[in-house]
Structure formats: C-alpha cells, structure tokens
Image: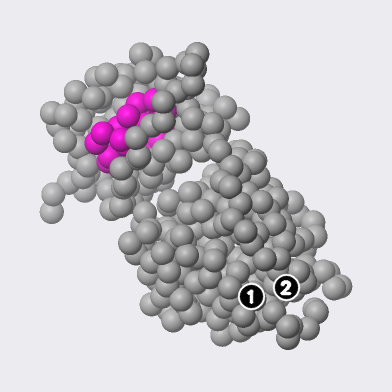
C-alpha cells in the first residue's frame, strides 16, 4: 500500500523536525519535504506532489492564511493547520477552516517539543483523515478594498435573510441536536445561517479542543439570525439560541421543571472524543424524546451513530448529510448504517428541511411541553 506523502510547512526548525519525525514513525505515511516558509512550500508542492500538507499559521514572507487562500484557489489539496493555543490563534484557525483547511492541530506555546510528541496520535490521525477528505476549489477572491493590506483575510459577511415565515410556539417545544467533526465547522455554519430567528434551540457537539470553541461561537453569532454561544453548565436552553459544547467538555441536556437546561461536564472521552456526540445524542433520546430533531454532519469515525438510532427509536426526526456534500462521510455513513436517518440530504437542504418538517408536522397540533 502506498504511503501518504506529507509536506510540513513551519518557520520553526524544531517544529519541522518534530513533525517529520512523528510522521515518519508511522507505517502508512512519509514526510517527503519540510519548508520554512510558503515560498519554499510552493516549490515543494509543485515538484513533490504531496497528498497532504501541514501548515503553520504565522510565518515569514507570506502568512499561512494568505498562502492557504492562494493554494485553495489554484491547487486545492488537503491541509492540516498548525495553530497556537491563543485567542489570536483560534480566530485565525476559524478563518483557515472557512478557506478550506480540513482540520487543525493546536500546538502549545511553551514546551513545544514535549507537547507535540504528546499530540502525535492526534496529528497523525488528522493527516490520515485529511488524506481521505473531499477538498473543493475556493472561488476567485473578490478585489480587495482600496488601501487594504495585501493578504488581509476577508471579513465575514452576513448572508441576506431569506423571507421566512415564523415558527412561533413550535420553537418552544423542540430542540435541534447537531453532531459534527472533520469539516463540521463550516457545515454547522451553513445549517445555522439558514435557520430563522425564532427557530427551536440548537445544541451542538463539534469535535474541537479547548480554547477554540468560544472564538467559533463568537464568529457564528455575528453571522446567524439566531444567537450562538458556548454552552454554560446549568443555563436554560432557549428558542432562537444555539449552544456549542466547550472544547474538552461534554454537553448534554436535562430537564428542570418545565424547562430544558444545558449540562456541561468533564469526564472520560467517549468514542475517543471529549466533547462526544454520543453523550449529547444519548441525552436527547432520554430527555427530549419525540421533541428532538437530530442532525449528523460531516466527520470521521462513528461517534454518535448508535445514539442517533436511540434518538430515532425514542421518536426524534433525524437527518444525515449526504456523501457528496461531506468533507468526510464517516459519521453520517455510520448513522445511516445504524438505521438512524429519516432523510439523507445535501448540506444546503438540511436547514430548510428542518423548518419544513416543523411546520408540516407540528404546525397546529403540538401540545406545549
């Protein structure tokens, strides 16, 4: 079996050496080149034709975001970003995922050598996933505004709101549960941006490490018609709001009298993940039952597939993203194989289908919980 060919791009000689060592220790991958800056990387990509590149965010001569933007327009390929655990690093990483990076690794600011070695399994797993990912060409860039600095990242723009009939009291009786992993930051954004402001509450588990989910939630909150925030333990789950599991903690739902509340807790990884979709979906089946709507988006592995079937058995309505629109089809495929899905849809049709299902099936007959 041929090995996955990887080019490492990082301005630190230490990091380049460590990543090359970690990669070359794997029987199924090989570091075929290491570049100190994007200009060197460009030549290596042209001559060595790698399957995956790892890309540092902040580098000399051309920053990683500028390089990634050009790469995804001219020669799209799987990219795993290497980011620092800082607020600035989190914001830039979110931009990199918008531009088409498959995933990212968060490297520590201090103790880099030991930290990267401890992350070896995570790094190589993400390279393997990236090698299987479906990567799409980025559309041509819009002309920069006069006086804008070269390579400046485009500011996110709010999508014009399509006319949407209100859901009214439907939103007080239902909760939408979303599970996602690789490619899921953009997929979740697509779903949330197409929900009306009075949509049911949304609870989301996206596989992410600590330090990144707050920036992700803030970015989505500025783009969506519903409010988006990182979930807090014990807070009431409200219509028109989306709650994202904090990185490194599990999210679930519980009842408190007539209300639903979020539970955010530490614990052992489930299916190797923390937060885990399995934890969220299991609570949805147990607590919300027929008032739940489940959505499984792009991601590697099977986290949440079994619990999504339990949700369906408890009366939920479930949608899985289809293979053609997934970056990685693993999690939806496993949920479909479990018999968990009522519908399998392209990403762009998921939000409209949720809204339509609520109107058609519960518009006049639901009883308030």
| Distance CA(mark 2)–CA(mark 1) | 7 Å
Give the class, few, some or many, for how many residues have Cα within 10 Å of label 2's Cα (few <14, many ≥20): many
Q: Quadrant of residue 282?
A: bottom right
Image-quadrant location for residue 220: top right
Q: Is residue 368 magenta?
A: no
Numbered circle sitting on residue 170: 2
Which of disc 1 and disc 2 is earlier in sequence? 2
**Foreground pick, 225 / 220:** 225
Q: Secondary structure at mark 1?
A: helix
Q: Which residues are magenta?
A: 64-82
Q: Residue furthest front?
A: 163
Residue beneath the point at 24% across and 36% down:
75
- For residue 218, side relative to residue 327 (left or right): right
Q: Which residue is mark 1?
A: 358
Badge 2 marks a residue whose secondary structure is helix
Q: Is residue 104 visible?
A: no
Residue 198 against residue 305 in the figure, above or below: above
The number of numbered badges drawn on the structure is 2
Q: Position of residue 331 (x, y in %)?
A: 42, 64
């Amino acid at each position: 079996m041929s090995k996955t060919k990887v080019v490492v791009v990082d301005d630190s000689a230490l990091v380049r050496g460590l990543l090359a060592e970690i990669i070359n220790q794997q029987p199924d991958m090989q570091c075929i080149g290491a570049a100190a800056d994007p200009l060197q990387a460009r030549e290596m990509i042209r001559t060595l034709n790698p399957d995956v590149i790892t890309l540092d965010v902040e580098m000399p001569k051309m920053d990683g975001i500028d390089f990634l933007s050009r790469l995804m327009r001219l020669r799209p390929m799987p990219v795993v970003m290497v980011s620092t655990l800082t607020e600035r690093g989190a914001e830039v990483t979110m931009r990199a995922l918008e531009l088409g990076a498959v995933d990212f690794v968060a490297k520590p600011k201090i103790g880099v050598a030991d930290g990267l070695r401890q992350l070896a399994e995570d790094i190589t797993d993400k390279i393997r996933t990236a090698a299987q990912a479906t990567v799409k060409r980025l559309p041509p860039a819009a002309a920069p505004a006069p006086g804008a600095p070269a390579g400046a990242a485009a500011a996110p723009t709010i999508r014009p709101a399509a006319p949407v009939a209100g859901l009214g009291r439907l939103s007080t009786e239902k909760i939408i549960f979303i599970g996602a992993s690789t490619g899921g930051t953009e997929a979740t954004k697509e779903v949330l941006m197409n929900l009306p402001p009075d949509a049911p509450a949304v609870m989301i588990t996206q596989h992410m490490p600590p330090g990144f989910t707050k920036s992700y939630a803030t970015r989505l909150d500025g783009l969506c018609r519903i409010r988006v925030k990182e979930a807090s333990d014990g807070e009431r789950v409200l219509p028109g709001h989306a709650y994202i599991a904090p990185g490194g903690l599990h999210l679930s739902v519980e009842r408190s009298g007539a209300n639903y509340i979020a539970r955010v807790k530490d614990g052992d990884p489930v299916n190797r993940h923390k937060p885990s979709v399995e934890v969220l979906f299991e609570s949805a089946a147990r607590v919300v039952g027929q008032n739940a709507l489940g959505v499984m988006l792009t991601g590697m592995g099977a986290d949440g597939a079994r619990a999504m079937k339990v949700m369906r058995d408890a009366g939920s309505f479930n949608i899985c993203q289809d293979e053609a629109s997934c970056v990685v089809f693993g999690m939806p495929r496993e949920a479909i194989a479990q018999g968990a899905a009522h519908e399998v849809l392209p990403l762009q049709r998921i939000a409209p289908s949720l809204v339509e299902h609520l109107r058609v099936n519960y518009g006049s007959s639901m009883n308030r919980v």
